[in-house]
Image (tube, grey):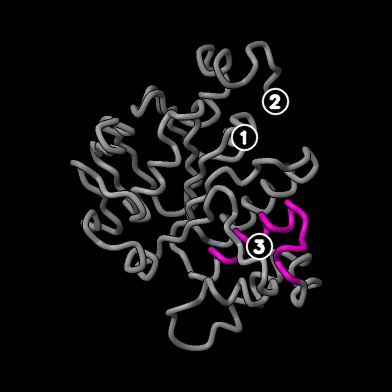
Amino acid sequence: MLLEVNDIHVHYGKVAALRGVTLEVAEGEVVALIGANGAGKTTTLKTISGLRPLSSGYVRFQGEDISKLPAHKRVKLGIGQAPEGRGIFPGMTVQENLLMGAYGRRGDVSGDLADVFDIFPRLAERRSQYGGTMSGGEQQMLTIGRALMTDPKVLLLDEPSMGLAPMLVTQIFAIIREINERGTTVLLVEQNAHQALQLADRAYVLETGRVFKTAGASDLLHDPEVRAAYLGGDLGVA
């Protein structure tokens, strides 16, 4: 198993954010985490990437316990994250932002940069433009591209469709599919449950810091409880 999260508990002060979350991601999969605001989805990603310490439980990556490793060492192992809110460097150009993703890597990264530009032609066209002058959709592409420059084995995506127009949401999800088809495993946190479940192989539903339900994504698309809570009840499912 590429990534294993076992019975993790995480606290913000005295408040329990995660209460025994267990999940796994196999190499080559797209796995989605869905749930309401405050369910613990972002905290789960931050704990996997090393940005939040856990109180108990463990995280394993490629069979190695990484629970106590700092975030930068997890990046070197192959855990890349595109955070919620994008967090680009507005005063840097597109290319400079992308190269920041390769910070600390040894050797020539020009091939990786070319791959990112191949996935995101818009970024190639605007490589000399400052990040802060780009649209929300372009900034989201830049955030994902920067994460790809870490050369991840698993890509953690936190709310990639947030704040985007419907047409751009469709485009971003098509890009995520392409990234996966090129060989990168994806763990996706997404409020747009319908899009996430159409893309994913499997999914976990989080509620108040716990895994409420897990199944194949297509099964969850047709699950009455999931549809009522996250898919608009009678929303048609293709």
Mark 2: amino acid? Ala
Q: Are marks 1 and 2 in contact (CB under 8 Å)?
A: yes
Mark 2 highlights which residue? 238
Determine whether the residue tagged by mark 1 lies in a helix, strand or loop: helix
Task: Tell me what residue is drawn at x 70 percent, y 66 percent.
Answer: 131
What kind of element bears circle 3? helix
Vertical placement of 101 versus 81: above or below? Answer: below
Is residue 114 shown above or below 163? below
Q: Which mark is residue 198?
A: 1
**What's the residue at 77%, 72% (across, down)?**
129
In the rendered image, the quadrant that contains the C terminus is top right
Left or right for 118, reference 99: right
Residue 143 is one of the magenta-drawn residues: yes
Q: Three-letter amino acid code at disc 1?
A: Gln
- In this image, 97 relative to 63: left or right? right
Residue identified by numbered label 3: 142
Residue sitting at 66 percent across and 73 percent down?
92
**Magenta part of the protein: which range?**
130-147
Point out the frontmost of discs 1 and 3. Answer: 3
Name the residue at the bottom extreme. Answer: 107
Q: Is residue 78 magenta?
A: no
Q: Position of residue 33 (x, y in %)?
A: 47, 36
Residue 87 found in image quarter: bottom right
